Image: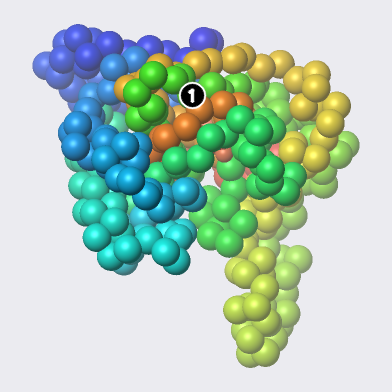
Amino acid sequence: MQPVHSISLDALQEGRPRSGEQARAWCARLEAGAVLYFPETPLPIPAQDQDFLLGSSQTESTLHKNIAYKPAQDKLSGMDAQADDTTTERLATFMRWYSSSVTSFLSGFLAPYRQGWLLDYASFRPIEEDGRDLPKHRRNDLLHTDAFPTRPTRGRRILRFFHNIHPTRTRDWMVGEPFTQILGQFTPGKLAMPVSNGTLTRAAKSLASATGLAKIAPRWKRTPYDQFMHELHNAMKEDEQFQRDCVRHSFQFAPGSSWMVYTDTVPHAVLAGQFALEQTFLVDPAATVNPSTAPVAVLEKLAGARLV
Ligand code: SIN
Ligand code: FE
């Protein structure tokens, strides 16, 4: 299967008359490991907002860091301390709009998910990706599958919608082999198989929460599934041989394009690019078209045990 599947806006229009069937087909493609790519975004950003985000309408832009927007609290995090209230308020207003536009678009495009997704964070990524100096586990130029260290998904899938808002430059990605192939390269040799909940006894769990340990060490709140996915993320980034030799495809996402992908299973890396928007959804495997492709299902089958 081609890792990146392009969809033109014309094809999107043509899909409308049989939208239920078409939406299931798009979901099935994503679940099988495709990146769905709109060379021309279906969600154009208004010109004044684009200027604001690129900082060109500001003499002293303070938007230097990746900034998260938490829709449930309607809050931004990661803003510079120096950012003035007007900039902060304007960015929050934009992100609120962006988050709800993506949600309403995907409610139709990926209609089956609507009943079973949680709207997670959105982000604005103004930093140049080429040459970022980050600790290994946080580097995004190394192929990896996503797992949030402090926010366990408990078996929900991580679906991300991206948008390259740079006016002239591409956002350059690599995409790796399907999840089951990657798993075979890491486990059981390099990484122990996940073990079921039974390993952390009820007594150990209540001790952890009674002593407040659960708060200090969020790791305790992770299910065996989350623990394994986090270890896999780290193992991929740490493995120099894997990074050097693994099969990968390069892809350049055009200025003004959008794409979406299950980043929990599709190994990916960003090598260069600046100014992107992103919205994350946590999808319940029960709402997916092929629940057996969810990483939790694949791992539970391998482990022969419940992992969430
Ligand atoms: C990532 O999820 O690894 C980052 C992708 C990007 O910012 O383009
Ligand atoms: Fe990632």
> Where does residue 291 sit, x and y in percent of width and height?
46, 36
Q: Nearer the viewer, residue 67 or 30?
A: 67
Q: Is residue 181 visible?
A: yes
Residue 302 rendering spot, x and y as whole percentages = 70, 39
Q: Secondary structure at mark 1?
A: strand
Could you tell me residue 127's position as x and y percent?
Answer: 51, 40
The quadrant of the picture occupied by the C terminus is bottom right
In the image, is 46 to the left or to the right of 28? left
| Rendered image quadrant of residue 233 | top right
Q: Is residue 100 left or right of residue 207?
A: left
Q: Is residue 87 left or right of residue 217?
A: left
Q: Nearer the viewer, residue 58 or 36?
A: 58
> As shown in the figure, which amino acid type bears the numbered disc 1?
Arg
Q: Residue furthest front?
A: 59
Give above or below for 67 relative to 248: below
At a point 47% along the width and 32% down the height, the residue shown is: 274
Q: Position of residue 17 (x, y in %)?
A: 11, 16
66 vs 72, nearest the viewer: 66
**Residue at image x 45%, y 60%?**
80
Crowding near pointer 1: few (<14 within 10 Å), some, many (20+)? many
Name above or below for residue 176 compared with residue 308: above
Give the number of callouts.
Answer: 1
Identify whether 205 is placed above or below 14.
Answer: below
Q: How is the image coloured?
A: rainbow
- Residue at horizontal 66 percent and vertical 17 percent from the top: 248
Q: Which residue is identified by label 1?
A: 171
Mark 1 close to ligand 1, CB under 8 Å: yes
The residue drawn where x is 82% and y is 35% is: 239
Quadrant assignment, res 43? top left
Left or right, residue 59 beside residue 232: left
